[in-house]
Image: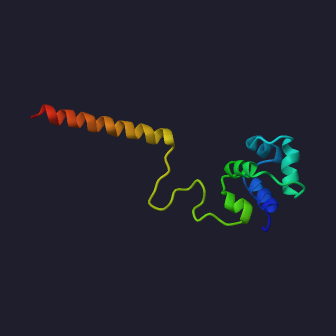
Amino acid sequence: MGSFASRLKELRKSKGLSQEELAEKVGVKSGKQTISNWENEKTEPTLSDIRKVAEALETTLSYLIEGVEPAVAVGEPRAGYISVPMEEFIDLQRRVIKQMDEERDKAGNDK
């Protein structure tokens, strides 16, 4: 795929989104018509709109603008890492801190 327009259309379709659905996710005025204009190279989106499109399509700005594939697929953890929703991660941190505090307090009372 050679252009922003062709990459946009390919990604939108691969995600199973209509032009209208993508427009809603991105929050562009004129909805479907705006996405159609971008895909048919009639108008160009702003950088701000491209960022929103990249987020909605789970890709990078580099891929949309230049066709440069990300080294790691967006949304997938790198080797040796796991992906955890932020809320779960924060909860886990709180539980570990609480456990460490309890163990420290117990060790202090045992003396």
Outermost residue, front direction? 47
Outermost residue, right direction? 42
State the count of labels.
0
Q: Quadrant of the N terminus?
A: bottom right
Residue 67 position in % (x across, y down): 72, 66
Residue drawn at x 60%, y 60% as measured from the top left = 73
Residue 39 position in % (x across, y down): 84, 56
Outermost residue, left direction? 111
Residue 106 position in % (x across, y down): 18, 33
Judge whether 66 appears above or below 82 on screen: below
Q: How is the image coloured?
A: rainbow
Asked which quadrant contains residue 98, the reply is top left
Outermost residue, bottom direction? 2
Residue drawn at x 36%, y 36% as measured from the top left = 95
Judge whether 6 appears above or below 15 on screen: below
69 relative position to 79: left or right: right
Q: Nearer the viewer, residue 61 or 75?
A: 61
Asked which quadrant contains residue 62, the reply is bottom right
Residue drawn at x 44%, y 39% as measured from the top left = 90
Q: Nearer the viewer, residue 49 or 103?
A: 49
Residue 18 position in % (x across, y down): 81, 47
Q: Quadrant of the C terminus?
A: top left
